[in-house]
Structure formats: C-alpha cells, structure tokens
Amino acid sequence: MIANANSPASRAGSLWLPFLISVGIALFLMTLMPTTMFWDRDEAFYARAAVEMIQSGNWILPTYNDAVFPDKPPLIYWLMMFFMHIFGENEFGARFVSAPATAASAFLVFLIASRLFDRRAGLWSMLVFASSTLSIYLGITAMLDAVLVAFICLALWAFLAIMQEREGFWFKAAVFLVAMSLALLTKGPVGPAVIVPAVAITWFLTRRDERAPFWQMVALAVATFVGVGIFLLWAIPANNMSNGEMLQAGIGEHVIGRALKPMQNHGAAGWLGYLAFLPAYIPTLFIGFMPSTLFLPAALVGVSRRAAALGSPSPRLFLLSWMVPGFVMFSLAATKLPHYIEPMIPAFAIAAGGLVAGNLAGGIASLRIGRWLYILQIAGLAAALLAVVVLAPTFLLKVALVVIALGCIGFAFRISVLHREGEFETAMRVALVSVFLLMESMFLLVIPAIEKDIKLSKPVAELLRKEFKPGTPIFEADYLEPSLVFYVGWPVDSPIRDIPGDQAGRMAFLAAPGEHALVATREQYEALKALDHAGRLVELGSFTAWNTNVSGRLQTVLVARLKP
C-alpha cells in the first residue's frame, strides 16, 4: 500500500536534510569531547568499568577498582569497550558513543514530530532538542543517558507508527522489542518506566475507532516481557557471579534506595528536605532547556490546553503522556540529579518545535514569561563569566571571558527582540548560532585553561605513572577519586587500596615490605608522616585545586613513595 502525501509517514518528506543535520550534531559534539578531563564522577566510574572488562575479558560482571560494580547494566560498558578499541582508553574513547546516540535521538525526534505535526516542526524539534544545555552536556560525557534516550525515542516512534498506520505492524513491533530490550540493558527499569506509561495512557485515552487494535497492544506488552527476558539473560548470570550483589545493590540500592532516600547528597534528608526538593526539576528543566527556554512556557501552555493538530493519536495526548508521568516519577524520588529528566526532554523539544513552526499557540503572556526567563538566564551566565575574570590566570583568558560575556549579552538582546516581534524561526536560528559559538569558545579556550585549578586526578595520575612501574601497589588516604583510578590505568588486579583510618592500620602500612605509592590529602599525609619513624615516606609532588568533585573545596593532594 502506497501512503498518500498527507499520511503521517509522508509528512517527513526527504530524510536527507535531517540526516545531514544529525551528522552535523554528532560532529559538533565530538569537537567538544576531547577538550576536557572527566567531569562527573560517573564518567570515570563507567569508563573504568569498561577498561576492566577489556582487561579481564569478563563481559558479564562489571567491576570497578577490582570490586563488583552493580550500579548499572552492561550495555554502556560494551559500547565504550568497542570505541576504546578504536580511539584508545581515554576520554574521547569513553565519551564517543554519546555523540552518535544524541544525533540518533535528534533524528528520531524529527520523525516523531513530523508524524505529530509536519516536516517543519520536525526539523525545529530536532534542533531544539540537540541545542538544549542538558542534551549537549550528556552528548559529550561518558554517561549512559544519551544512549538511553535514543532507545526511548526509538520505542515511542515504533508505537506512534503503529497507532497511525495499520500496515507493517510486526516490523514496528520488532523495533519496539529491540528498543525496550536495549533500554533495559542500558539503565534497567528507567526506560520502561518512561515508555510504558506513554504507550498505555496514549492508547487508552485515544478514541476507540482511532487507536490501534487491542491485540496489537497485547503484542507490545508481550514484547515488553520478552525484553525483560532478554535483560534477565544477562542479569541472572551476573547476579550469580556476584553472589547476589547485582540484585541487592543494583535494584535494591540504586533503584529502590534512590527513590526512598537521597543518596550521595543528591537531595535533602528528612520530610522538610524532601518537600523542599519536590519542585527541584522545574528550575532544572528551564535551565537545562536553554536556549529554547524562550519557547518552553508557551509550548507547555499550547500543548496542555488544546489539541495541537488533527490526527490520531492527538499530539497533545501523546506528548503529555510522555512528559508528565516521568517528570512526576522523578520528582517524587528522593534522590535528585539533573540528568534524570533527560528522557522527557525530547517531548518538551517537540512541543517547543511545534510552537516555533506555528503548530502550537501558547498566548502572549506565556511568550513573555519565556523571554524574561531567557534574559535572566543569559544575565546570570554573563555575570558568572565576568566573575571568573577575577580568577583567570592569564590576561588573554580574562579578555576571552569578557568577550564571551559581551557576546552572550549581544546575542540575547537580538534574540529577545526577534522573539518579541514574533519572528520565532529567525530567533531560533540566531540562538543556534549563539549556542555553537558559546560552546566552542568555552570548551576550546576557557575550560582547558582553568581545569588545572579545579581538577586534580589527571596530574596526580601522570606523576604516579612517571614514578612507578605499572602494578606497583597504590594506597590512598582521603582521596579515592574514580577519575584517579581511570587515569592511573593500572591492571585490573592492582586496585588502589584504602589506608586504614586507625593508628594500628596506618602503622601496618608504614611497616609493609616493598615499594608502595601513596596518594593523600595534605592533612592525611602529615598525619602519616608523624608516624613514619623509619623515614620511609618521600614526597614526590603535590597539587592544589578547588576540587569540583568535593563541592569546590580547596584541596591539596600529595604523591609520595614508601621506600622499600
């Protein structure tokens, strides 16, 4: 059967332009990846787990620092392993998969938005998604969220195609099954927790004569359970190999535990703290959605109060079924991290893209709110850049920061004027240029110049690699950063060990035979030195920074040798 020109499948038109835009998105993200050391602790956790899989040849049970690492399923490690074989065991190799994953998500956003609205809305939606601050961050880091979002988008595209077209069901159901299985292997139940409510609510609330047959939804439910079975093909052996730790910690702690109490200070303790953090993802959404914060309030109003376009399922119903359940679920969880809401960002981007393309109307008041939120965000960014000028180590960096800050203000003024005049597409084009210039200038000029003042692990690891043979026992006191374990790169059977906190344990370390390496904060090193009556500790070097991994606290870390 040949689809007519107005069918949902035909609204996308030629796929060459969105494909080329997706390639451009991936290349843009790749230019940013190798410019910085690891940021988030999770980056180094995942990257090191992938390295240990390579070294051990054990693809089933993830380990970190030669201990079971039950935090996440293995797909992200497998993908990192593949690209590390190509690009090396470095930041770029670990991060690479996030760029094509983000580009794939953008392409799928185009396909979904084209089905819901039209081709123009599809193009703007993919650009809104790819240019959002949160998507860019996750697209250049060694995290798993970019990969997860790609599989969520793929599953929801398959469902939407099933709802809109009766032919080709089994192919689309197979795509849904693959996407569900891979989402589970990426982040466990998080993928289904977003996909299943979007599918169930959309189907149930769509008019009976316009929705897919019930048996097709039963088939998708079976596909979901088959996806769980595929996940269990890995999970059961991994749990057995870990003596139950994968289930106990992976589900009990990192899924149920994170929902019930804040972990690693990502939230606040007690009922008052919990209630105070309930709306945390509202400002997170608006900040993470920059620069399209301009259109977000109006898009939310438009998609909430009226059907966005003709057709089935209603774009309003489908987008709200995607946005709301996940947003509420993560808001109710006690542990809060900004990237938790990324699986819903494509839906917000499609709503904003529909507004830019003229498929949604949100009203003058909501447009004004978006414009002022954007202006306040840019003002805050410019103020932060100018504040850093005082701390910049070189004159050239000071000049660069001032130029970037003034550029942000200039672009914001022009974008705001265009937005106020209703020139939404032109405003968005200028916003895209501003994002490209801001990110490239920050990641190529500014961040590399200040990294040594905010990160410690890489220079510490370089000194260790220079002074010691691979496999030399390394001990640490109050400084076991995941990025240190990654950058040192010792064999998997030579983990970095903690020095006991009690005096007897420290004396035992100082009396241990053979040569050892020590990494310790200044305070811990001085305490150990006071116990070193034999004079075996020799300081090799020290590094001081406002460590971003400990809330920006000023920290001095020393490398020392414990002589034989």
Image (cartoon, helix red, strand yellow):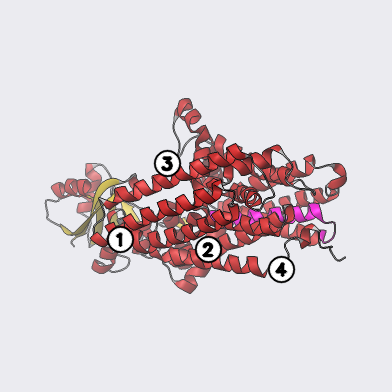
Q: Look at label 2 and name its amino acid.
A: Ala
The reply to whether callout 3 and callout 2 are in contact (CB within 8 Å) is no
Q: Look at label 1 and name its amino acid.
A: Ala
Q: Earlier in the sequence, mark 4 or mark 1?
A: 4
- The picture quadrant where one finds residue 73 is bottom right
Q: Look at label 4 and name its amino acid.
A: Ser
Which label sits on residue 264? Answer: 3
* Outermost residue, front side: 421
- The picture quadrant where one finds residue 66 is bottom left
The reply to whether callout 4 and callout 1 are in contact (CB within 8 Å) is no
Closer to the eye: label 2 or 4: 4
Q: Magenta segment, principal secondary structure?
A: helix
Q: Look at label 3 and name its amino acid.
A: Gln
Mark 2 neighbour class, 10 Å CA radius: few under 14, some 14 to 19, many 20 or more: many
Which label sits on residue 14? Answer: 4
**Region of the chain picked out in magenta, as a range:** 143-169
x%, y% of residue 11? 75, 60
Q: Considering only vertical position in the picture, is 288 above or below 559? A: above
Residue nearer the viewer, 373 or 28: 373
Whether residue 454 sits left or right of residue 164 in the image: it is: left
Q: Earlier in the sequence, mark 3 or mark 2?
A: 2
Q: Which residue is mark 1?
A: 449
Q: In this view of the protein, can residue 80 be seen by the observer?
A: yes
Mark 3 neighbour class, 10 Å CA radius: few under 14, some 14 to 19, many 20 or more: few
Gap in angstroms between the C-alphas marked 4 and 3: 47 Å
Whether residue 157 appears in magenta in the rendering, the answer is: yes
Whether residue 174 sits left or right of residue 81 in the image: it is: right
